[in-house]
Image (cartoon, coloured by chain):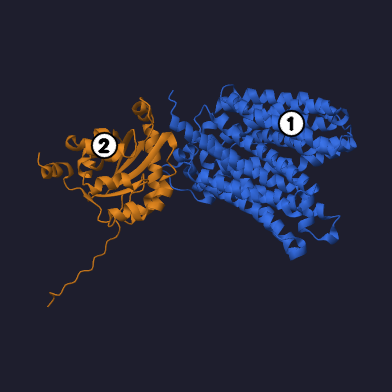
Chain colours: A orange, B blue
Amino acid sequence: MNKLVVIQEATVALKLHPKIMDILFYHKRDVSSGLRDLKGIHGIDHVAIIMINPELEISIFSLFPSVEYNLIANELWKFDRCFNPMTLEDKTLNWWEDSYHLSYQHELRHLKEDIHQFTLGMNLVRKIDGFTLIYSFATRNKMDDLKSYYSNLKDELFQMGDYGYKLIRGMSERYCYPYVAPSLGEEIRRRPHLKLVINNDLR
Amino acid sequence: MISLCKLNSTSKRIIFSGLIGNLLESFDIMICIYLAHIVSQAFFSPSTQNKNLLYTFFVFLAGYLSRPLGSLLIGIFADQVGRKKMLVYSLLMTGGCTAIIGLIPSYQTIGVTASILFLFFRILQNISVGGEYISSISYLVESASKHKRGFYGSWVSVGFNGGALLASFLVYIVVSGINHNYLPEWSWRLIFLVAIIGTLLGYWIRISLPESLGYILANSSSRQPSKFTILKSSFFYLKEYPLYCLSLMVISWLGVSETSAIFIYSPIHMATINTLSVQKALEINTLSLLLLTLIIPFFGYLYDRINRLKLLVMTTISFIVLAPMYFYYLSYGSYFQILISKLLFSIPSACYYAVATVLITESFPVSIRCTSLALIYQMVSALAGGLTPIILIYLSQHYHPGWAPAAYIMLSGGFCLLGLSYLYTFRHRQPLAESAEFSLIELT
């Protein structure tokens, strides 16, 4: 299948935030000091919060930005349903390995999991008034029954994701314009938007 | 039940962080006490040589009194911004103050400024120590699964007693070195500087720890409460459950008073009422402290397997039964009789440290846990810790030295049993220990 067609199929109108590299790396220290609070709980080794605004613009706040950077640099994120809110249902737990497009699953698995020695990755989806928050967790544990272990902890993982989002919400505000990053449990608000209108056509 | 290697390594780090923090805290506080005779000569005027030791003890008292304040301040912050951050700050503050005390120039060099700096940093050190205990016990209990809380929490007491042992050991070595001219006179300052190494190690461990799971679950989607709301909610809680809180207070009282009796007052009793030398008295103290520290985790393990209230009832009855024998031998017994009775008394003490601290911690809702602990546990600690030695000295001087101090411990034990019986009936009516749902929002 033509690569371009696949991209069109998978991504629709999704786009990365124009300052995605800044978001990933410029705030690395702040993001890391926040999300580090979750690292180690229930054996979680990687945490990222993917925020998709109502205009389908993707921002990523990651404990280890290299995980997401590899996908962006190779343009493979478009073939990973982890980044596509249209294919993800609210309040669900999805495994990374089930989200890869069949044509690129080996590359995606290699870049996202094998390089970092992750044995299992998962996404938890929370949709709040037009925004989609995707809590992305990964572990390096090597037990066989990891999926059932984490499935049983779904509610706690959601709460951990919510807590992580609370910690980085201030930072995410800067990249949401013209929206206001949603507060959990609160209605989404649109920031008062004043636009200067220049009309030279008045006679 | 899944047993993941990775989870175990995180668990080990969590336990070690609680251990090292309290070890350092106790070490930092105790080296000052053990070195009181040297410190008093260094930081106070040589012209008041006879009173310098007394002045030093006034500095210790000021520090001791400031501890509940620090505990409350740090407790409120720990409930607001999380346990982990406050654990890091309290560790740095305690270790920093200790190192600075070791670096303060002597009175002969900077005059009265040395005394003032000593007082200031001792108070600051105690403020952070007050916060360390409640934050770390909450952190360990909240990081453990429901069936491992006793074992996790018990390591706070292991650290606390281990720190006292380490301080005693290092002070013994350095002071012996100074007395035998192997070490220069100023080398006592090196013990204070040891705190820097411990603090850096503790910082490295704590900064990479996760926040406590209990705190995360309780605060995942709620807004961060204001400090005033937390304080108001804690007072509301005390007002709403006065008998419950009073029960926890009498349980705390027994623990603090028996600690004072066994480790602070007993060397004085052995040396004054009995004719044992101070060195022998301290030797017995160290041996019983060693036994106590070693068996605490065992009782923490039991806490998770046996009915904790029944375990605490048995511990309290042991105190009541052993107290007369303990004080009788302390007054009239030989070295070995005292040693045996003290080692025996250490067993219920270890059980109390493992069980009661975790039980009291679990009794408060997560959202106001550190503040409530500060209000109840630390206030009682300051009061009982300060009053018990005075009461015991008074009783042994004015009444029978063998029975009268024992009567005080037995009376404290009796009140503790009443508190435990109330707790038992209350728990059956309302499972308050799991009352994480206690909502701050309802109160605002």
Which residue lies at the image location 70% right of the left edge and 32% below the top edge? B290
Q: Name the image quarter holding the C terminus of chain A.
A: bottom left
> Which residue reaches farthest front?
B182
Query: B370 or B283: which is nearer to us?
Result: B283
Residue B373 location in percent, x, y? 60, 41
> Which residue reaches farthest bottom?
A203
Image height of A154 relative to B135, above or below: above
Residue A6 in sight from this viewpoint: yes
Q: Dot 2: what SS?
A: helix
Residue B21 location in percent, x, y? 59, 42
Q: Name the amino acid type tagged 2.
A: Arg
Image quadrant in which you'd find residue B134: top right
Q: Which chain carries label 1?
A: B
Give the labeled residue for mark 1: B288
Left or right of A21: which side holds B234?
right
Q: Name the amino acid type tagged 1.
A: Ser
Give the labeled residue for mark 2: A109
Q: Are marks 2 and 1 in contact (CB under 8 Å)?
A: no
Image height of B405 relative to B221, above or below: above
Image height of A62 relative to B138, above or below: below
Give the distance between the C-alpha atoms of the residues marked 2 and 1, in whole angstroms.
Answer: 58 Å
Image quadrant in which you'd find residue B322: top right
